[in-house]
Amino acid sequence: MVWRKARTLPGDDTAARMWMFGIARRVLSTYRRTVRRHSALRDKLRAELAARPNRSANAQDSELHTVLGILDQLDQEIIRLTYWDGFTQKEAAQILGLPEGTVRSRHHRARIALRHAVGAAPDISMPR
């Protein structure tokens, strides 16, 4: 941030230092607000998902949960958010508080693992 406003930097060393502390304080304040908003959104989504009625326990759902069990918790959550809840990978990254590239790569690897687990041919693609 400091480099963006370098022209307005005070000439006095003490004033310049105080000016930079002010910028740092505002940047940290913005970061803290962002973290609080993301946490609140995550909590709200978890509460909403917990309040939903459970899906019917038919054989297909049971098989699906078994296959999803091969993935670690984070990958399962990414798959649920993108396929069941209809979020994009970018939105899932925001919900989980992860970089978009991390969610994209984990999503890709999870799809490959699931495809392998259900014995699908490599040329059969799962919906995105």
Image: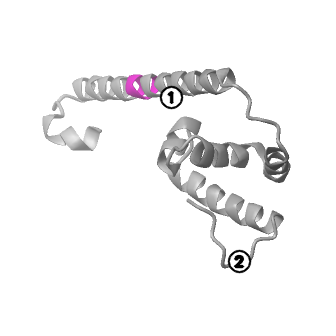
- Is residue 17 or residue 82 the one in the foreground? 82
Residue 102, given in percent of the width and then of the height, sits at 59, 53
The residue drawn where x is 17% and y is 30% is 10
Q: Which kind of residue does numbered mark 1 sit on?
A: His
Q: Earlier in the sequence, mark 1 or mark 2?
A: 1
Task: Tell me the residue that label 1 is attached to.
Answer: 38
- Is residue 23 or residue 83 the one in the foreground? 83
Horizontal arrangement in the rendering, residue 12 relative to residue 110 (left or right) = left
Quarter assignment of residue 114: bottom right
- The numbered dot on residue 122 is 2
* Magenta stretch in the rendered image: 28-32
- Is residue 118 or residue 42 the one in the foreground? 118
In reply to whether residue 72 is colored magenta, the answer given is no
In reply to whether residue 29 is colored magenta, the answer given is yes
Q: CA distance from mark 1 to mark 2?
A: 37 Å
Horizontal arrangement in the rendering, residue 98 relative to residue 123 (left or right) = left
Horizontal arrangement in the rendering, residue 110 relative to residue 6 (left or right) = right
